[in-house]
Protein backbone atom coordinates (compact mmCIF):
# COMPACT_ATOMS: atom_id res chain seq x y z
CA UNK A 1 0.00 0.00 0.00
CA UNK A 2 1.41 3.40 -0.98
CA UNK A 3 2.14 6.27 1.41
CA UNK A 4 -0.73 8.44 2.54
CA UNK A 5 -0.72 12.07 1.45
CA UNK A 6 -2.65 14.97 2.92
CA UNK A 7 -3.99 15.97 -0.49
CA UNK A 8 -3.96 14.42 -3.96
CA UNK A 9 -4.42 16.95 -6.78
CA UNK A 10 -5.54 15.61 -10.17
CA UNK A 11 -4.41 17.86 -13.04
CA UNK A 12 -1.52 20.32 -13.28
CA UNK A 13 -3.06 23.23 -15.17
CA UNK A 14 -3.23 26.62 -13.42
CA UNK A 15 -5.86 25.42 -10.92
CA UNK A 16 -3.98 22.24 -9.99
CA UNK A 17 -0.54 23.83 -9.97
CA UNK A 18 -1.66 26.74 -7.80
CA UNK A 19 -3.60 24.45 -5.43
CA UNK A 20 -0.55 22.26 -4.97
CA UNK A 21 1.75 25.25 -4.46
CA UNK A 22 -0.48 26.83 -1.80
CA UNK A 23 -0.94 23.54 0.08
CA UNK A 24 2.71 22.50 -0.08
CA UNK A 25 3.77 25.98 1.00
CA UNK A 26 1.56 25.57 4.07
CA UNK A 27 3.46 22.37 4.91
CA UNK A 28 1.02 19.72 3.69
CA UNK A 29 2.12 16.55 1.92
CA UNK A 30 0.80 16.96 -1.62
CA UNK A 31 0.79 14.59 -4.58
CA UNK A 32 0.05 16.02 -8.06
CA UNK A 33 -1.00 13.58 -10.78
CA UNK A 34 -0.95 14.91 -14.36
CA UNK A 35 -1.79 12.67 -17.29
CA UNK A 36 0.34 14.65 -19.77
CA UNK A 37 4.07 15.21 -19.96
CA UNK A 38 5.12 18.86 -19.87
CA UNK A 39 5.75 21.04 -21.78
CA UNK A 40 2.43 20.61 -23.57
CA UNK A 41 0.20 22.92 -25.57
CA UNK A 42 -2.90 24.34 -23.89
CA UNK A 43 -5.33 27.02 -24.92
CA UNK A 44 -6.19 29.90 -22.53
CA UNK A 45 -3.45 32.45 -23.11
CA UNK A 46 -4.85 35.85 -22.17
CA UNK A 47 -4.79 36.64 -18.45
CA UNK A 48 -6.68 39.31 -16.52
CA UNK A 49 -5.08 41.69 -13.99
CA UNK A 50 -6.78 39.90 -11.09
CA UNK A 51 -4.52 36.90 -11.70
CA UNK A 52 -1.26 38.76 -11.13
CA UNK A 53 -1.40 39.04 -7.29
CA UNK A 54 -1.84 35.25 -7.05
CA UNK A 55 1.12 34.58 -9.32
CA UNK A 56 3.22 37.02 -7.31
CA UNK A 57 2.10 35.57 -3.99
CA UNK A 58 3.29 32.14 -5.16
CA UNK A 59 6.57 33.60 -6.44
CA UNK A 60 5.97 32.39 -10.01
CA UNK A 61 8.88 33.38 -12.23
CA UNK A 62 7.55 35.68 -14.96
CA UNK A 63 10.09 34.98 -17.69
CA UNK A 64 10.12 37.25 -20.75
CA UNK A 65 9.90 34.31 -23.12
CA UNK A 66 6.58 33.23 -21.54
CA UNK A 67 4.93 36.39 -20.14
CA UNK A 68 4.10 39.32 -22.43
CA UNK A 69 2.80 42.59 -20.96
CA UNK A 70 -0.90 43.17 -21.80
CA UNK A 71 -2.40 46.63 -21.48
CA UNK A 72 -6.04 45.77 -22.12
CA UNK A 73 -8.56 44.59 -24.70
CA UNK A 74 -9.77 45.91 -28.05
CA UNK A 75 -13.11 45.03 -29.58
CA UNK A 76 -13.02 45.32 -33.35
CA UNK A 77 -15.69 45.15 -36.04
CA UNK A 78 -13.95 45.33 -39.40
CA UNK A 79 -17.25 45.30 -41.31
CA UNK A 80 -18.40 48.59 -39.78
CA UNK A 81 -14.99 49.99 -38.88
CA UNK A 82 -15.88 50.25 -35.20
CA UNK A 83 -13.21 49.83 -32.56
CA UNK A 84 -13.26 50.22 -28.78
CA UNK A 85 -10.10 49.89 -26.68
CA UNK A 86 -10.28 49.36 -22.92
CA UNK A 87 -7.10 49.84 -20.95
CA UNK A 88 -6.92 48.23 -17.50
CA UNK A 89 -5.55 51.62 -16.37
CA UNK A 90 -9.16 52.83 -16.51
CA UNK A 91 -10.39 50.33 -13.91
CA UNK A 92 -11.60 51.13 -10.41
CA UNK A 93 -8.69 51.42 -7.97
CA UNK A 94 -7.46 48.12 -6.60
CA UNK A 95 -5.76 45.32 -8.52
CA UNK A 96 -2.83 45.79 -10.91
CA UNK A 97 -3.55 47.92 -13.98
CA UNK A 98 -2.15 45.55 -16.57
CA UNK A 99 -1.96 41.83 -17.18
CA UNK A 100 -0.08 39.27 -19.29
CA UNK A 101 -0.58 37.12 -22.33
CA UNK A 102 1.14 33.80 -21.79
CA UNK A 103 2.26 30.82 -23.76
CA UNK A 104 0.63 28.11 -21.67
CA UNK A 105 3.30 25.41 -21.91
CA UNK A 106 5.75 27.68 -20.06
CA UNK A 107 3.10 29.28 -17.84
CA UNK A 108 1.72 26.02 -16.46
CA UNK A 109 5.26 24.71 -15.94
CA UNK A 110 6.24 27.90 -14.06
CA UNK A 111 3.36 27.48 -11.57
CA UNK A 112 4.11 23.79 -11.16
CA UNK A 113 7.77 24.58 -10.49
CA UNK A 114 6.65 26.54 -7.44
CA UNK A 115 4.60 23.58 -6.18
CA UNK A 116 7.65 21.34 -6.61
CA UNK A 117 9.88 23.87 -4.90
CA UNK A 118 7.55 23.99 -1.88
CA UNK A 119 7.78 20.19 -1.66
CA UNK A 120 4.88 18.76 -3.69
CA UNK A 121 5.46 15.35 -5.28
CA UNK A 122 4.63 15.96 -8.97
CA UNK A 123 4.15 12.98 -11.30
CA UNK A 124 3.56 13.31 -15.04
CA UNK A 125 2.11 10.68 -17.35
CA UNK A 126 -0.15 9.44 -14.53
CA UNK A 127 -3.89 9.45 -15.16
CA UNK A 128 -6.45 9.41 -12.37
CA UNK A 129 -8.85 6.60 -13.20
CA UNK A 130 -11.16 6.32 -10.22
CA UNK A 131 -11.68 7.83 -6.79
CA UNK A 132 -13.24 6.17 -3.76
CA UNK A 133 -14.13 8.31 -0.78
CA UNK A 134 -15.03 6.91 2.62
CA UNK A 135 -15.15 8.20 6.18
CA UNK A 136 -11.40 7.91 6.76
CA UNK A 137 -9.67 8.62 3.49
CA UNK A 138 -9.70 8.97 -0.28
CA UNK A 139 -8.33 6.14 -2.44
CA UNK A 140 -7.23 7.22 -5.90
CA UNK A 141 -6.65 4.56 -8.53
CA UNK A 142 -4.23 5.76 -11.18
CA UNK A 143 -2.68 4.32 -14.32
CA UNK A 144 0.33 3.50 -12.09
CA UNK A 145 -1.33 2.07 -8.98
CA UNK A 146 -3.18 3.15 -5.86
CA UNK A 147 -2.60 6.35 -3.83
CA UNK A 148 -4.29 7.41 -0.59
CA UNK A 149 -4.91 10.80 0.96
CA UNK A 150 -7.05 12.72 3.41
CA UNK A 151 -8.48 14.93 0.65
CA UNK A 152 -8.88 15.00 -3.15
CA UNK A 153 -8.77 18.07 -5.40
CA UNK A 154 -10.15 17.68 -8.91
CA UNK A 155 -8.35 20.18 -11.16
CA UNK A 156 -8.84 18.20 -14.37
CA UNK A 157 -10.14 21.15 -16.39
CA UNK A 158 -12.59 20.48 -19.21
CA UNK A 159 -12.09 16.73 -18.63
CA UNK A 160 -14.09 17.45 -15.43
CA UNK A 161 -13.26 14.03 -14.01
CA UNK A 162 -15.62 13.94 -11.01
CA UNK A 163 -18.50 15.76 -12.69
CA UNK A 164 -18.53 13.13 -15.43
CA UNK A 165 -18.28 10.24 -12.97
CA UNK A 166 -20.99 11.69 -10.77
CA UNK A 167 -23.07 12.84 -13.75
CA UNK A 168 -23.30 16.38 -12.39
CA UNK A 169 -22.41 18.28 -15.60
CA UNK A 170 -25.03 20.97 -16.25
CA UNK A 171 -24.44 22.47 -19.69
CA UNK A 172 -24.98 26.18 -20.13
CA UNK A 173 -26.53 26.67 -23.53
CA UNK A 174 -26.85 29.85 -25.59
CA UNK A 175 -23.08 30.53 -25.61
CA UNK A 176 -20.27 29.65 -28.05
CA UNK A 177 -20.11 25.98 -28.96
CA UNK A 178 -16.67 25.27 -30.39
CA UNK A 179 -13.40 26.92 -31.37
CA UNK A 180 -10.85 26.47 -34.15
CA UNK A 181 -7.43 28.03 -33.58
CA UNK A 182 -3.76 28.10 -34.45
CA UNK A 183 -0.48 29.86 -33.74
CA UNK A 184 1.65 31.92 -36.12
CA UNK A 185 5.38 32.11 -35.37
CA UNK A 186 8.11 34.26 -36.92
CA UNK A 187 5.66 37.14 -37.38
CA UNK A 188 7.45 39.80 -39.44
CA UNK A 189 8.36 43.16 -37.93
CA UNK A 190 5.71 44.78 -40.17
CA UNK A 191 3.07 42.33 -38.96
CA UNK A 192 4.10 42.73 -35.32
CA UNK A 193 3.95 46.53 -35.57
CA UNK A 194 0.18 46.16 -36.07
CA UNK A 195 -0.13 44.52 -32.65
CA UNK A 196 0.50 47.91 -31.08
CA UNK A 197 2.43 48.93 -27.99
CA UNK A 198 -0.03 47.64 -25.42
CA UNK A 199 -0.10 44.06 -26.78
CA UNK A 200 -3.89 44.17 -26.29
CA UNK A 201 -5.98 41.11 -26.99
CA UNK A 202 -8.25 41.80 -30.00
CA UNK A 203 -11.77 40.43 -29.92
CA UNK A 204 -13.09 40.53 -33.46
CA UNK A 205 -16.79 40.52 -34.28
CA UNK A 206 -17.45 37.71 -36.72
CA UNK A 207 -20.66 36.20 -38.10
CA UNK A 208 -22.20 33.70 -35.68
CA UNK A 209 -19.50 34.18 -33.07
CA UNK A 210 -16.24 36.00 -32.58
CA UNK A 211 -12.51 35.62 -33.07
CA UNK A 212 -9.42 36.40 -31.04
CA UNK A 213 -5.94 37.67 -31.81
CA UNK A 214 -3.58 37.26 -28.86
CA UNK A 215 0.01 38.45 -29.16
CA UNK A 216 2.48 36.16 -27.40
CA UNK A 217 6.14 36.52 -26.44
CA UNK A 218 8.63 35.97 -29.25
CA UNK A 219 6.59 37.65 -32.01
CA UNK A 220 4.01 34.87 -32.01
CA UNK A 221 0.25 35.25 -32.55
CA UNK A 222 -2.53 33.03 -31.28
CA UNK A 223 -5.58 33.35 -33.52
CA UNK A 224 -8.87 31.53 -33.15
CA UNK A 225 -12.51 31.67 -34.10
CA UNK A 226 -15.44 30.67 -31.89
CA UNK A 227 -18.67 29.51 -33.47
CA UNK A 228 -22.03 29.66 -31.84
CA UNK A 229 -23.76 27.34 -34.27
CA UNK A 230 -22.90 24.00 -35.81
CA UNK A 231 -20.20 23.25 -38.36
CA UNK A 232 -16.82 24.14 -36.89
CA UNK A 233 -13.97 23.32 -39.29
CA UNK A 234 -10.43 24.31 -40.24
CA UNK A 235 -11.84 25.96 -43.40
CA UNK A 236 -13.92 28.28 -41.26
CA UNK A 237 -10.72 29.66 -39.76
CA UNK A 238 -8.94 29.75 -43.12
CA UNK A 239 -11.79 31.73 -44.67
CA UNK A 240 -11.84 34.18 -41.81
CA UNK A 241 -8.07 34.74 -41.88
CA UNK A 242 -8.23 35.47 -45.60
CA UNK A 243 -11.21 37.81 -45.25
CA UNK A 244 -9.87 39.95 -42.39
CA UNK A 245 -7.78 42.85 -43.73
CA UNK A 246 -6.08 43.38 -40.35
CA UNK A 247 -5.20 39.75 -39.72
CA UNK A 248 -4.08 39.14 -43.29
CA UNK A 249 -1.51 41.89 -42.82
CA UNK A 250 -0.45 40.66 -39.37
CA UNK A 251 0.27 37.11 -40.53
CA UNK A 252 1.76 37.87 -43.96
CA UNK A 253 5.09 36.01 -44.15
CA UNK A 254 4.61 34.26 -40.77
CA UNK A 255 4.69 30.49 -40.30
CA UNK A 256 1.44 28.79 -39.36
CA UNK A 257 1.51 25.88 -36.88
CA UNK A 258 -1.02 23.10 -36.29
CA UNK A 259 -4.75 23.94 -36.38
CA UNK A 260 -6.80 22.62 -33.45
CA UNK A 261 -10.52 22.27 -32.83
CA UNK A 262 -12.07 22.17 -29.38
CA UNK A 263 -15.56 22.08 -27.96
CA UNK A 264 -15.59 25.11 -25.70
CA UNK A 265 -19.07 24.88 -24.37
CA UNK A 266 -19.91 26.25 -20.96
CA UNK A 267 -21.14 24.22 -18.03
CA UNK A 268 -21.47 24.14 -14.29
CA UNK A 269 -20.67 21.22 -12.03
CA UNK A 270 -23.74 20.80 -9.81
CA UNK A 271 -21.68 19.07 -7.10
CA UNK A 272 -18.39 21.02 -7.03
CA UNK A 273 -17.50 19.74 -3.54
CA UNK A 274 -18.52 17.16 -0.98
CA UNK A 275 -17.03 14.81 1.56
CA UNK A 276 -13.22 14.97 1.26
CA UNK A 277 -13.21 16.52 -2.22
CA UNK A 278 -13.38 19.84 -4.06
CA UNK A 279 -13.33 20.73 -7.76
CA UNK A 280 -11.38 23.86 -8.71
CA UNK A 281 -10.99 25.74 -11.99
CA UNK A 282 -12.75 24.46 -15.10
CA UNK A 283 -13.74 21.21 -13.41
CA UNK A 284 -16.13 23.25 -11.25
CA UNK A 285 -17.39 25.64 -13.94
CA UNK A 286 -16.44 26.88 -17.39
CA UNK A 287 -17.78 29.98 -19.09
CA UNK A 288 -17.33 30.79 -22.81
CA UNK A 289 -13.86 32.40 -23.14
CA UNK A 290 -14.86 35.63 -24.91
CA UNK A 291 -13.82 37.71 -21.89
CA UNK A 292 -10.70 35.64 -21.05
CA UNK A 293 -11.95 34.77 -17.59
CA UNK A 294 -10.96 31.08 -17.32
CA UNK A 295 -7.40 31.10 -15.98
CA UNK A 296 -8.03 33.99 -13.62
CA UNK A 297 -11.09 32.29 -12.10
CA UNK A 298 -9.19 28.98 -11.97
CA UNK A 299 -6.38 30.60 -9.95
CA UNK A 300 -8.86 32.40 -7.71
CA UNK A 301 -10.85 29.27 -6.93
CA UNK A 302 -7.63 27.34 -6.22
CA UNK A 303 -6.42 30.00 -3.81
CA UNK A 304 -9.73 30.29 -1.95
CA UNK A 305 -10.29 26.53 -1.68
CA UNK A 306 -6.78 25.72 -0.48
CA UNK A 307 -6.73 28.55 2.06
CA UNK A 308 -9.82 27.05 3.67
CA UNK A 309 -8.53 23.49 3.31
CA UNK A 310 -5.23 24.29 4.98
CA UNK A 311 -7.01 25.35 8.14
CA UNK A 312 -9.39 22.38 7.99
CA UNK A 313 -6.51 19.89 7.64
CA UNK A 314 -4.84 21.43 10.67
CA UNK A 315 -8.06 21.12 12.68
CA UNK A 316 -8.96 17.64 11.34
CA UNK A 317 -12.19 18.95 9.79
CA UNK A 318 -11.50 17.95 6.19
CA UNK A 319 -14.21 15.23 6.10
CA UNK A 320 -16.99 17.79 6.59
CA UNK A 321 -19.08 17.53 3.38
CA UNK A 322 -20.09 21.19 3.65
CA UNK A 323 -16.53 22.44 4.18
CA UNK A 324 -16.21 24.13 0.77
CA UNK A 325 -19.75 25.47 0.55
CA UNK A 326 -18.82 29.08 1.39
CA UNK A 327 -16.00 28.99 -1.16
CA UNK A 328 -18.24 27.74 -3.93
CA UNK A 329 -20.87 30.33 -3.07
CA UNK A 330 -18.24 33.05 -3.20
CA UNK A 331 -16.53 31.93 -6.42
CA UNK A 332 -19.94 31.36 -8.04
CA UNK A 333 -20.35 35.15 -7.95
CA UNK A 334 -17.36 35.48 -10.25
CA UNK A 335 -18.57 32.79 -12.66
CA UNK A 336 -22.10 34.21 -12.62
CA UNK A 337 -20.83 37.73 -13.38
CA UNK A 338 -19.06 36.47 -16.48
CA UNK A 339 -21.98 34.21 -17.45
CA UNK A 340 -24.30 37.22 -17.34
CA UNK A 341 -21.86 39.27 -19.43
CA UNK A 342 -21.35 36.47 -21.95
CA UNK A 343 -25.10 35.99 -22.21
CA UNK A 344 -25.50 39.65 -23.08
CA UNK A 345 -22.61 39.48 -25.54
CA UNK A 346 -24.38 36.77 -27.57
CA UNK A 347 -28.00 37.66 -27.02
CA UNK A 348 -28.44 41.40 -26.54
CA UNK A 349 -27.24 44.71 -27.93
CA UNK A 350 -24.54 45.08 -25.27
CA UNK A 351 -21.81 45.06 -27.91
CA UNK A 352 -23.42 48.04 -29.67
CA UNK A 353 -24.51 49.87 -26.56
CA UNK A 354 -21.87 49.23 -23.97
CA UNK A 355 -18.78 48.14 -25.85
CA UNK A 356 -18.72 50.11 -29.12
CA UNK A 357 -21.08 52.72 -27.69
CA UNK A 358 -19.17 53.16 -24.43
CA UNK A 359 -18.50 56.78 -23.60
CA UNK A 360 -14.83 57.72 -23.46
CA UNK A 361 -15.31 58.55 -19.80
CA UNK A 362 -18.21 58.61 -17.37
CA UNK A 363 -19.21 56.78 -14.23
CA UNK A 364 -19.86 53.37 -15.69
CA UNK A 365 -16.61 52.97 -17.62
CA UNK A 366 -14.30 52.15 -14.66
CA UNK A 367 -16.77 49.59 -13.36
CA UNK A 368 -17.03 47.95 -16.81
CA UNK A 369 -13.24 47.83 -17.09
CA UNK A 370 -12.97 46.34 -13.59
CA UNK A 371 -15.26 43.49 -14.60
CA UNK A 372 -13.27 43.02 -17.81
CA UNK A 373 -10.17 42.87 -15.61
CA UNK A 374 -11.58 40.03 -13.52
CA UNK A 375 -12.03 42.18 -10.41
CA UNK A 376 -15.45 40.60 -9.88
CA UNK A 377 -15.47 39.88 -6.16
CA UNK A 378 -15.51 43.45 -4.85
CA UNK A 379 -18.88 44.59 -3.47
CA UNK A 380 -18.70 48.18 -4.74
CA UNK A 381 -18.98 47.72 -8.50
CA UNK A 382 -22.35 48.92 -9.91
CA UNK A 383 -21.83 47.19 -13.26
CA UNK A 384 -21.16 43.85 -11.56
CA UNK A 385 -24.27 44.32 -9.42
CA UNK A 386 -26.32 45.11 -12.51
CA UNK A 387 -25.13 41.86 -14.12
CA UNK A 388 -25.74 39.77 -11.01
CA UNK A 389 -29.13 41.26 -10.24
CA UNK A 390 -30.61 40.62 -13.64
CA UNK A 391 -33.80 38.64 -13.47
CA UNK A 392 -33.34 36.93 -16.83
CA UNK A 393 -30.83 34.09 -16.45
CA UNK A 394 -31.53 31.83 -19.44
CA UNK A 395 -28.07 30.26 -19.27
CA UNK A 396 -29.31 28.53 -16.13
CA UNK A 397 -32.12 26.81 -18.04
CA UNK A 398 -29.93 23.74 -17.87
CA UNK A 399 -32.28 22.42 -15.20
CA UNK A 400 -34.80 21.90 -17.98
CA UNK A 401 -32.30 20.51 -20.44
CA UNK A 402 -31.87 16.86 -21.22
CA UNK A 403 -28.38 16.71 -19.72
CA UNK A 404 -27.49 13.23 -20.96
CA UNK A 405 -28.25 14.00 -24.58
CA UNK A 406 -26.51 17.40 -24.41
CA UNK A 407 -23.38 15.67 -23.07
CA UNK A 408 -23.52 13.11 -25.86
CA UNK A 409 -23.94 15.84 -28.46
CA UNK A 410 -21.09 17.92 -27.07
CA UNK A 411 -18.75 14.93 -26.84
CA UNK A 412 -18.93 14.74 -30.62
CA UNK A 413 -17.62 18.28 -30.95
CA UNK A 414 -14.53 17.73 -28.76
C1 LIG B 1 -11.08 28.15 -27.10
C2 LIG B 1 -10.72 28.56 -25.71
C3 LIG B 1 -10.05 29.76 -25.49
C4 LIG B 1 -9.73 30.16 -24.20
N1 LIG B 1 -9.09 31.35 -23.99
C5 LIG B 1 -8.82 31.76 -22.74
C6 LIG B 1 -8.14 32.98 -22.50
O1 LIG B 1 -7.77 33.71 -23.42
N2 LIG B 1 -7.91 33.34 -21.21
C7 LIG B 1 -8.29 32.55 -20.17
O2 LIG B 1 -8.06 32.92 -19.02
N3 LIG B 1 -8.90 31.38 -20.37
C8 LIG B 1 -9.18 30.97 -21.62
N4 LIG B 1 -9.77 29.76 -21.82
C9 LIG B 1 -10.11 28.96 -20.66
C10 LIG B 1 -8.88 28.26 -20.07
O3 LIG B 1 -8.32 27.40 -21.04
C11 LIG B 1 -9.27 27.45 -18.85
O4 LIG B 1 -10.20 28.18 -18.06
C12 LIG B 1 -8.07 27.11 -17.96
O5 LIG B 1 -7.12 26.38 -18.68
C13 LIG B 1 -8.56 26.33 -16.74
O6 LIG B 1 -7.49 25.86 -15.96
P1 LIG B 1 -7.62 24.50 -15.15
O7 LIG B 1 -6.36 24.37 -14.39
O8 LIG B 1 -8.92 24.45 -14.45
O9 LIG B 1 -7.72 23.35 -16.27
P2 LIG B 1 -6.66 22.96 -17.40
O10 LIG B 1 -5.77 24.09 -17.70
O11 LIG B 1 -7.44 22.37 -18.52
O12 LIG B 1 -5.79 21.82 -16.73
C14 LIG B 1 -6.32 20.56 -16.45
C15 LIG B 1 -5.19 19.55 -16.39
O13 LIG B 1 -5.70 18.31 -15.91
C16 LIG B 1 -5.10 17.25 -16.63
N5 LIG B 1 -5.99 16.09 -16.50
C17 LIG B 1 -7.24 15.97 -17.01
N6 LIG B 1 -7.77 14.79 -16.66
C18 LIG B 1 -6.86 14.15 -15.89
C19 LIG B 1 -6.83 12.89 -15.21
N7 LIG B 1 -7.87 12.04 -15.24
N8 LIG B 1 -5.71 12.54 -14.51
C20 LIG B 1 -4.64 13.40 -14.46
N9 LIG B 1 -4.60 14.59 -15.10
C21 LIG B 1 -5.71 14.98 -15.78
C22 LIG B 1 -4.98 17.80 -18.03
O14 LIG B 1 -4.00 17.10 -18.79
C23 LIG B 1 -4.59 19.26 -17.77
O15 LIG B 1 -3.19 19.44 -17.74
C24 LIG B 1 -10.07 29.33 -23.11
C25 LIG B 1 -10.74 28.12 -23.32
C26 LIG B 1 -11.06 27.73 -24.60
C27 LIG B 1 -11.76 26.42 -24.81
Image (tube, helix red, strand yellow):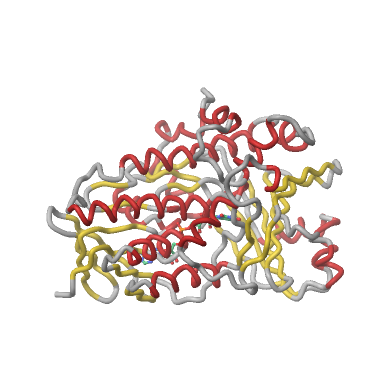
Observer-nearest residue: 111 or 220? 111
Q: Is residue 382 above or below residue 214?
A: above
**In the displayed structure, does residue 177 sit left or right of residue 166?**
right
- On the rendered image, what quadrant is the N terminus found in? bottom left
The residue drawn where x is 30% and y is 69% is 31
The residue drawn where x is 59% and y is 45% is 176
Observer-nearest residue: 220 or 259? 220
Observer-nearest residue: 244 or 75? 75
Q: Position of residue 10 (x, y in %)?
A: 34, 63
Q: Is residue 371 above or below residue 191?
A: above
Q: Is residue 277 above or below residue 31?
A: above
The residue drawn where x is 40% and y is 41% is 403
Res 258 quadrant in image: bottom right
Question: Furthest-front residue in view?
Answer: 93
Q: Position of residue 193 (x, y in %)?
A: 84, 65
Q: Position of residue 248 (x, y in %)?
A: 83, 62
**Count the marks: how many?**
0
**In the displayed structure, does residue 374 sit left or right of residue 318?**
right
Q: Position of residue 272 (x, y in %)?
A: 34, 46
The residue drawn where x is 50% and y is 45% is 266
Observer-nearest residue: 320 or 262? 320
Amino acid sequence: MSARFDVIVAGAGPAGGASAAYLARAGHRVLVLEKDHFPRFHIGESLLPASTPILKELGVEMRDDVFLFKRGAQFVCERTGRLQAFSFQEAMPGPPRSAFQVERAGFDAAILDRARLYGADVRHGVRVESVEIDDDEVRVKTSEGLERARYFIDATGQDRFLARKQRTVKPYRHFGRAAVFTHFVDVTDEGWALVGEGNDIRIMMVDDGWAWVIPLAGQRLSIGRVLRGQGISKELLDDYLASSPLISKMIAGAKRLETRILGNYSFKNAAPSGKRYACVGDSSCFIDPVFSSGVTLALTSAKEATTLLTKALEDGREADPDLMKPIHEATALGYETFAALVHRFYNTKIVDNLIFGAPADGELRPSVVSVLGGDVFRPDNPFRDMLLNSRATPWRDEEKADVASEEAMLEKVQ
